[in-house]
Amino acid sequence: MARTVSLPPPRDLSHHFSTTTKRREASSIKDLYKYFLIPGIANLAGGLPNASYFPYDTLEASVAHPHRFEPSAAPSPSSTSARVLIPKESSSTDLQKKIDLTTALQYGTADGLAPMAAFVRQFTRRHLHPNVPYARGPDTLLTCGSTDGFSKTIEAFTNLWDPARDGPSQREGILCEEFVYMNAIATVKPRGLNVVPVAMDAQGMRAHGTGGLADVLRNWDLRNGKRPHLMYTITIGQNPTGGTLSVDRRREIYALCRQYDIIIIEDDPYWNLQYPSAAALEAQYRGSRSSNTASPRRNYNAHGKSSGYEFLDSLVPSYLSVDTDGRVVRLDTFSKTIAPGCRLGWVTAQPAVIERLARITETSTQAPSGFVQAMVAELLLGQQVDDAAAARNKGAEADRGWQMDGWVRWLEGLRGGYERRMQHMCRVLEEARFLVDADDAVALTSDEEVWEVVEKRQMFEFTWPTGGMFVWIRMCLETHPLYGKYAPDRLSRALWVHLTQAPYRCLLGPGTMFAPTPTVADRAWQYYRLCFAAMPAEEVQGVTERLVDGFRAFWQRKDLDGLEGEETYAVQSGNLLGTGC
């Protein structure tokens, strides 16, 4: 018989709540809502419009089969689809199962549409994070996407700082990677937070070494404000660098966050887009041994409960897997798994944190769009019926939706599709890193052979991304013939303009877009972010070849004529910029 392990409760972290968050009171309407659910009750209390006046009778859509995309290396997409229909009113009398317009378009609580919220909670607790190491596990709350979840989390844990009113000692701070998704930084800067970058390597944030997390925290100067109590991080397919943080590195960083009492805000929109092939292919091309231990056959849940799916068990897990204190707030989104326009996601955290985030939601966005919740719930769950309704409709074809098996299979198919795009782009880049210049070659002849002495210059370097949607490249502008004649950042800007022009027509994300502080921006000119996700798979190789042709042509230039005017975005360019989380 297996021994039951008693887990500790999550720590009380309420001392990190902002002054406003501590003052928030529970919604009185939410307390009243439970009475709305009593069958047959005459509701004279709520200010609900009559559902018969909603102008929508049904919502219908043609949707993909969950097996549309193959997870294997050989793409064979299926175009089969199914039709889903959301009725005006469900035949079920159980409000926990109702997916209909009468319910979805009516006022409700911050928890959202009950079947949608229940699916997310079940998926999160049983399958995505089955081994969270604190008693009773985490809770979830629906959001209007990761940006909304992050904004509410920042509101919950930080106080506004005004330099005209407050002294430096009152200023709070947030840690982040030295290259970071800038929408997050744009959220925190207006609140006066001190943004503190931490050094990175190919995996992501470094725990130790110069500029690493331990170094930053140990040597914090209180004259710059309070030591940061928050950390924002993307740990899988990091945006913009494409790195994935190992479990061992997570443990090191988590130990430091425990030591210095830091809340970890883990933003993981790319968690299912992990690429086990990347490190092996890079090593194969470069004749080196891969140091990456990720394997498509590794079971990260072997020590505890299985997720129930081999695919999910094979993925590098969240910080939640080591979160003994309950100090991780994780942001998830349907933006990369269904569509960005859904504006639907969820937050996972210890119950006390979720309760405060729910209070913020009650007086701000309230629940996500009822249209979106209904469409996503119908896709995943189909029409939910109680026993009485099932008996009445016996023999009728059931609308079952994807269910959990279909949802996980869809996630695996998406991984396969994006991994193939990554491979197409990186193979072309790998073979074009060096410019071979034979103009001044010396010919050596013999009776049987002709040899040439050639010059080989490296134009760029990169690491194959182990997750996400981006390749992060460093331009080796020090090898350019004009290096020294022009300032490096000027040369980099000229390269960007050059690539937008015919015949190359490629739009790249400049590294300066991802620099959270002026100090980082001073060296960010070396980098560009390339997105392989947005373009059709059959175009990735051709667009990347066009890009490297542009690199080669730029290395042949003798001046920057025509490249130093107004930097405008090219029309009909190969868009390698992408957007973000």
Image (cartoon, rainbow, N blue to C red):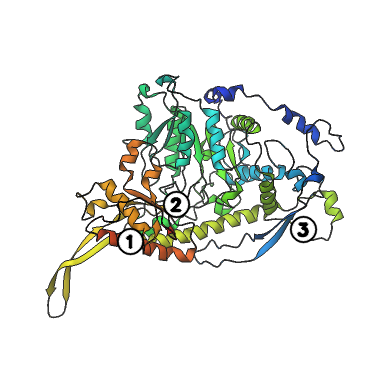
Q: Secondary structure at mark 1?
A: helix
Q: Is residue 458 left or right of residue 166?
A: left
Mark 2 surroundings: few (<14), some (14-19) or many (≥20) residues within 10 A: many
State the residue position of label 2.
Answer: 294
Q: Earlier in the sequence, mark 3 or mark 2?
A: 2
Tag 1: residue type? Gly
Q: Secondary structure at mark 3?
A: loop
- Quadrant where the N terminus sits is top right
Tell me how far mark 3 sits from mark 1, CA to CA: 55 Å
State the residue position of label 1.
Answer: 550
Tell me: residue 162, above or below residue 529. above
Q: Which of 216 and 111 lies nearest the eye of the viewer?
A: 111
Q: Earlier in the sequence, mark 3 or mark 1?
A: 3
Tell me: residue 175, above or below residue 318. above
Residue at (44% x, 41% y) in the render? 182
Tag 2: residue type? Ala
